[in-house]
Image (cartoon, rainbow, N blue to C red):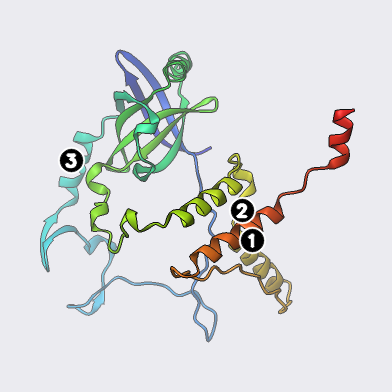
């Protein structure tokens, strides 16, 4: 497993040398863009619109646009100095909190934490302390020149670090348009909706959920590779938007559908149990 960060994390006076490994991966199928006429891959050039010429990497500088078309230019030496001043590889856990106190909107990316040389004992100590207390640690870390807020928690037998957004990175929900008032809900519709929720409630099993589009796309790609042009049409269960008048009918139809899916109790088995 590739190491993306190496340093240490501490709580109190306990210091743990660790390595970070990316815990998740993006399995999206990447499609290239080709020229339709000759099927050559399309390349992209960086062109200056004023000079009307291609710009090489060494001719490009970084800048911050503080107002429309007005920039503050920052040279590489300034950015590198700032990076080194803040790139402390020792990450300190600032606070311990309960996981349920953090809304999922804050979570960003997950990393497995592995102990580095001679860090096994302290690693096991922190893992046990988090398990026994039911808490998670809040820390700061710099990854790829960006300061991140992060939480450290136990995942199965490992410590997991999850970067989380700073509060100013989460947009204000008050800015979301057209949110309906809560008192617009009809009681009969709510009761039926709650019944539907109850019918669909189950234990979470991540293995039952699959990316059907990605699977179908790979099947299409494999068929075209083998020279076949016949592709089975995918059946999509489209849900049309409901208005107020047919909302109740949609809820009832959904309930009926979930009842059909659930297997009827086996009478023979029940009779044997009584015997």
Instruction: Tell me which residue sits at (32%, 29%) in the image.
Output: 138
Q: CA distance from mark 3 to mark 2?
A: 44 Å
Residue 266 visible, this angle: yes
From the viewer's perspective, tell me whether residue 228 is left or right of residue 160.
right
Which of the marked residues, 3 or 1, is nearer the chain's N terminus?
3
State the image coordinates of residue 30 (x, y, percent, origin top left): 52, 63
State the image coordinates of residue 194 (x, y, percent, origin top left): 51, 49
Which of the marked residues, 3 or 2, is nearer the chain's N terminus?
3
Instruction: Tell me which residue sits at (31%, 60%) in the image.
Output: 179
Circle nearer the viewer, 1 or 2: 2
Residue under pointer 2: 210
Instruction: Tell me which residue sits at (30%, 29%) in the image.
Output: 139
From the viewer's perspective, tell me whether residue 189 is left or right of residue 172.
right
From the viewer's perspective, tell me whether residue 106 is left or right of residue 203.
left
Q: Residue 82, which numbered label?
A: 3
Q: CA distance from mark 1 to mark 2?
A: 8 Å
Q: Residue 215, which numbered label?
A: 1
Residue 29 visible, this angle: no
Tell me how many marks there are: 3
């Amino acid at each position: 497993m590739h190491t993306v960060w190496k340093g240490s994390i501490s709580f109190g006076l306990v210091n743990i040398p660790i390595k970070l490994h990316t815990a998740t991966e993006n399995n999206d199928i990447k499609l290239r863009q080709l020229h339709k006429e000759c099927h050559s891959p399309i390349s992209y050039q960086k062109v200056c619109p004023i000079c009307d010429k291609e710009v090489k990497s060494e001719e490009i500088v970084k800048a911050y646009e503080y107002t429309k078309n007005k920039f503050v230019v920052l040279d590489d030496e300034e950015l590198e100095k700032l990076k080194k001043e803040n790139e402390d590889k020792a990450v300190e856990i600032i606070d311990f909190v309960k996981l349920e106190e953090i809304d999922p909107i804050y979570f960003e990316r997950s990393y497995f934490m592995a102990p580095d040389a001679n860090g096994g004992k302290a690693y096991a100590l922190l893992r046990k302390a988090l398990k026994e207390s039911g808490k998670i640690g809040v820390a700061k870390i710099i990854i790829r020149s960006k300061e991140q807020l992060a939480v450290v928690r136990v995942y199965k037998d490992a410590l997991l670090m999850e970067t989380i957004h700073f509060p100013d990175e989460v947009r204000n929900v008050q800015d979301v348009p057209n949110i309906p008032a809560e008192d617009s809900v009809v009681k009969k519709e709510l009761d039926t909706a709650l019944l539907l929720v109850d019918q669909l409630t189950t234990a979470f099993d991540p293995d039952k959920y699959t990316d059907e589009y990605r699977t179908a796309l790979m099947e299409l790609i494999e068929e075209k590779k083998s020279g076949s042009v016949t592709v089975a049409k995918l059946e999509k269960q489209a849900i049309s938007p409901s208005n107020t008048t047919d909302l109740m009918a949609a809820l009832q139809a959904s309930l009926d559908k979930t009842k059909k899916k659930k297997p009827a109790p086996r009478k023979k088995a029940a009779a044997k149990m009584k015997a």
